[in-house]
Amino acid sequence: MLPHKTRLEICQELRSRHKYTPVLFLTAKDTVGDRVTGLDTGADDYLVKPFELQELLARVWALLRRPQSIETSTTEQHLQVADLELDIENQVAYRGGQIINLSEKECQLLAYFMTKKSGLKTPLSRG
């Protein structure tokens, strides 16, 4: 159980602030009505306990494969990873004191890669 707010209230708040953030309910609430309410509130997926770890991982990977809008994948217009900085609004990157003007597509791709953690590999990662 969650203190002070229900899972549905938290989901609604998250959806209002971060439209494209994946939401997966892990819950013991297993009626059809519970699942429909969770999905209608904004959850992308709903998994009832108990569940197999393989199924959970498959569902998480499925959610992460979905494309996101660059505009909503970050609340900032300025990103930084190591010595690489990106000004999304002005479509300019900075690295090592050098200014790199970008096309709209280049800026979108760079922002996408800077906001994704897909390059990280963990013992549970696939592929």
Image (spheres, rainbow, N blue to C red):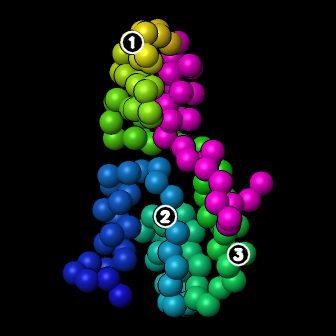
Tell me where residue 114 appears, x and y as whole percent.
50, 35
Q: Residue 102 in the image: state x and y as whole percent.
A: 50, 12
Q: Is residue 56 left or right of residue 113?
A: right
> Would residue 38 be seen by someone viewing this image from the given angle?
yes
User: Residue 23 got which mark?
Assistant: 2
**Amino acid of disc 3:** Glu
Say which quadrant the N terminus sits in.
bottom left
Q: Position of residue 107 (x, y in %)?
A: 50, 21
* Sequence-first tag of 3 and 1: 3
Could you give the CA–CA distance between mark 3 and mark 2, rounded to whole angstroms?
16 Å
> Which residue, given by chain and number where applicable, does mark 3 sit on?
55
* Residue assigned mark 1: 97
- Between residue 112 and residue 124, name the one nearer to us: 124
Question: Residue 47 or 56: which is nearer the viewer?
Answer: 56
Residue at position x 45%, y 25% in the image: 84
Magenta range is 103-127
Q: Amino acid at mark 1?
A: Gly
Residue 91 visible? The answer is: no
Between the C-alphas of marks 3 and 1, the distance is: 46 Å
Q: Nearer the viewer, residue 28 or 52?
A: 52
Residue located at (45% from left, 64% from top) = 42
Q: What is the residue that sits farthest to the right in this orientation?
A: 127
Mark 2 residue type: Val
Q: CA distance from mark 1 to mark 2?
A: 39 Å
Q: Say which residue appears at 45% left-offset and 42% top-offset.
A: 73
Dots 1, 2 in contact, CB < 8 A: no
Q: How dense is the environment of label 3, judged by Cα within 10 Å: few (below 14), some, or many (20 and up)?
A: few
Say whether marks 3 and 2 touch (CB < 8 Å): no
- Quadrant in the picture for residue 93: top left
In this rendering, which labeled residue sits more in front, label 3 or label 2? 3
Q: Single out the mark in the foreground, 1 or 2.
A: 1
The quarter in which the C terminus is drawn is: bottom right
